[in-house]
Amino acid sequence: MTSTLRHLPSRDVERLSVYLDGQLPEREQVLLRARLAKEPHLQRALVELQSTVRLLHSLPQVKPPRSFRLTAEMVAPRQAGWALPSLRWATAVAAFAFFSLVGVDILTSQVSMMAGAPQAAQEMPAAEPLLLEQGEQRAEADSESLMTPEEESVQSEPALPAGTPTGAPTETQADSLAAGAAMSADEVDATEQAAGLMAPSFRTGPTEDSAESATLPLAAAGPRLWLRLAELGLALLVVGLAWAGWRLRRRTW
Amino acid sequence: MSEQALVDMAKEGDLTAFNRLVVSHQTVVYNLALRIMGDPAAAEDAAQEAFISAYRKLGGFRGGSFRAWLMRIVTNACYDELRRYRRRPQTPLEDLNPLDEPAEVDSAGFLQSDEEGPEAAADRAELARALRECLDRLPLEFKVVAVLVDVQGFDYKEAAEVMDKPLGTVKSRLARARSRMQECLQGYRELLPLEMRLESERT
């Protein structure tokens, strides 16, 4: 067993409700009356609605238990004492500290960025000539090592007098071969030395220096992390104090 | 003295003029608060808060219906009070609500006949309780419009002003509130007037 109203489209319930209050436009009233004459369930719904409204209308007015007249004390602004001004001051100080900290943070990060840039720029030109020099040496050494002992002797020895036999290596040639071998060993040393002189940023393998340089950002991140945490803490403090002040002000007024 | 004159004087800080406005509106204010809150003590608090708030905000009243403006403040005070109860629900409102309200029942003239016997009086009191319970079960936005229009007798325009909602919203909410009330009251059909009992029961 359910009410008729429940099964009616909400549009029809609204029309009936407005009709009951005499607020339905004339044209819609005519249409609704025509429907009411033909549709018994709509008529039943109207009766249900009418009875409900009548019951609600008949609810009595309750006499107030007392008078709500205001007194001068009631409307005087309540004294918040020292709490409100103190909260305002604390909020202002916390906000000032927060913005100062943010300013310091921005400045230090800019300074460290500016200090980092020339250092990298200085490292680059220092490494380049070294590499060029090393490259030249290497090219020279390569071209020398590619030469056959004969060519080498031709190049290194003064032209032999005509008729000198060339088939077997001469004593001079043997010396030059030995010198060539010694040069290859020197070349390896020179390369190693050059590698040792190279800037750390140009080295590829992990070395002690690179391990040291990797720990630097971590060491620098410590104070920065604390700075950020302090900023966050201060921001929360400002919000909390402002909220407390607002609540107190609302309670006072 | 006209209401507008009293409002103007109260705006200037005349508390006596404002108290004359309080006296003329306090019954409606308390009843609106009582129907929304469903609890006499909470309604009393909300009504007092509303009058204090109205006095302080009077400078912002830009004319129009003072009653609608005041009822809007009352409604907002009730919302605040209800929110406070929900945040700290140590004592549920329905537990505070007494089962019978002597003041209301004594003054209830509805459905009362001169030769009413004790049984009829008890039925009447039960019906009043049923109505209160059904009102309390309505969602807040439906309850407010039902109380404003059907209990306090506000017209649609004034109710829209109090609720700060368009007229269309008032109409649709009121229709749904009435429909829900009717449905809820079927649970107390033995107390209802004959025309309200459903067809199936009558036959």
Image (cartoon, coloured by chain):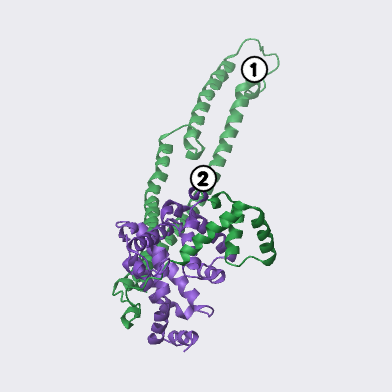
Chain colours: A green, B purple
Q: Is residue A154 left or right of residue B99?
A: right
Subunit under mark 2: A
> How far across and how far down the image is residue A184, in percent?
54, 23
- Give the SS element for disc 1: helix
Residue A123: give its label: 2
At mark 2, the secondary structure is helix
Image coordinates of residue B54 in percent, x first then y, are 42, 76
Q: Which residue is mark 1?
A: A150
Question: Is B99 situated left or right of A105 in this image?
Answer: left
On screen, residue A38 above or below B43:
above
Q: Give the residue drawn at x 35%, y 77%.
A: A68
Asked if badges 1 and 2 are on one and the same chain, I answer yes
Percent x, y for residue B187? 43, 51
Is A11 left or right of A71, judged from the image as shown?
A: right
Residue B75 visible to an observer of this rendering: yes
- Residue type (three-letter) at the residue carrying disc 2: Glu
Nearest to viewer (mark 1 / mark 2) = 2
Q: Earlier in the sequence, mark 1 or mark 2?
A: 2
Evaluate whether residue B168 shows in this view.
no
